[in-house]
Amino acid sequence: MAKDRMAHAMAETLIGKVVTDMKNDPERGLRNIIDLFLMMPREKFSENLFSLVQRMLSNEDSAYYTLVKKVASDVSSENLKRFAVNIAFNSCGKGAKMIRERSCELGFPIPWSISIGEDFLEKNNNAVKKIVTEGKELGTYLYLIFGPKCMDDSVMEVYRENNDCAFILFMDSKNIRDINKFDGINNVIISIAGDDRDSLAEAADVMHKYSRFFAYHRYYDDENMSCILDDSKMEAISDYTNSFVFFIPKESCSKNACLKTKEELRKIRDTQKYAYIPIDIKSDVSEIEETISEGSYSVFFVEDGKTLTSKGNKFAERYDVSNEYIGDYLKKMYLSLK
């Protein structure tokens, strides 16, 4: 416990220094990111990120330099530091260690991240608080929450109460207006989406106004996959993010389309052409999970309490939020899909 507290204090100090340096000198701050990877667990995914940063430093034409400057000028130090600490240390460090230990102890793989869908949240007002509280006991520190209800007062309170967790909130740009209610809440990144460019631009302006760390997301399937990866489309969305672009496969998306998108996004990351980092929510997260705990998966609570996993399985038995411990439900789900 004392060792964990010391490591956390070191992470806070180092990340705080990197953020300060990035604000004062973005390029020097970028080079200091190498120090972050040296203190992170030497997992495959951190090695991959380490390699990506090294390639970036050797590529003077990398658009990621523009990205770092954008983050440095756009995002408040508090938002950037808190989200970085919660991802790098709590989720990928302490949380990953807990997941491995608890998975062995309980006999089933524990999810690295948990997603809560819009329809599920509509019918389960207390879902976020209970899932986060019980999920942290298992080692899960990353939560993805979809839909406008992620800004409900009761859900906002969960972000405040769990300042050691990282939350990614996915919303339509039309639901983004005045977000001053996030003042003092720095452990979130807000991702916007939509087909109306005026609405997207307005939402992005709001994010800039409040110095928020924000992203853009896009759903894909077999029909639109090629279209959304078109160079002109990829370039255009640079205006709607200061960090990531998340690509989310629809439930109907074929395995072949998912695989092709994964390969294309990897190539795009390697070329470092756009001033954002493209992430495939399914394949990239699954790769991280496999390095944390063999057989691990993320779960997505959808309508009527049904659950999707990052392995592509669907568990139809309803999760009773009010009366069922999440660990018991996850074990039951794993045994049924095994």
Image (cartoon, rainbow, N blue to C red):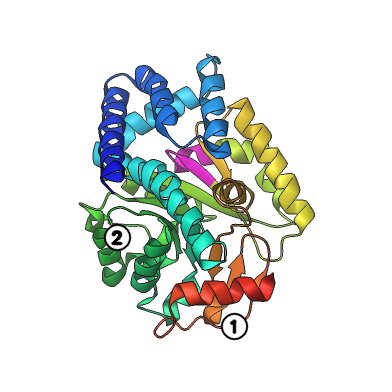
Q: Is residue 237 magenta?
A: yes
Which element is circle 2 on? helix
Q: Going 31% across and 27% down the picture, which residue do you hit?
A: 18
Crowding near pointer 2: few (<14 within 10 Å), some, many (20+)? many
Residue type indicated by callout 2: Tyr
Mark number displayed over residue 159: 2
Which residue is labeled 1 in the image? 317
Q: Mark on residue 279?
A: none
Circle 1 crowding by C-alpha within 10 Å: few under 14, some 14–19, many from 20: few
Q: For residue 270, which quarter of the picture? A: top right
Above or below, 58 relative to 39: above
Identify which residue is drawn at 31% across, 33% down. Answer: 15
Q: Is residue 224 magenta?
A: no
Residue 85 point in image, percent of width and height: 33, 42
Q: Earlier in the sequence, mark 2 or mark 1?
A: 2
Seen in the picture, residue 291 relative to 309 is either above or below; the reply is above
Q: Is residue 99 visible?
A: yes
Residue 164 position, x and y percent, is: 30, 52
> Could you tell me which residue is drawn at 35 percent across and 22 percent down?
29
For the residue marked with disc 1, what is the amino acid? Glu
Question: Which element type, helix, strand or loop, lies under badge 1?
Answer: loop
Q: Residue furthest left?
A: 184
Query: Camera-side residue: 179 or 213?
Result: 213
Confirm or deny contact between disc 2 and disc 1 (CB under 8 A): no
Instruction: Identify the residue at horizontal 56%, vertical 46% (top origin).
Output: 288
Is residue 200 visible in the rendered structure shown here? no
Residue 221 falls left or right of residue 56: right
Q: Quadrant of the C terminus?
A: bottom right
Part of the protein shown in magenta:
236-245
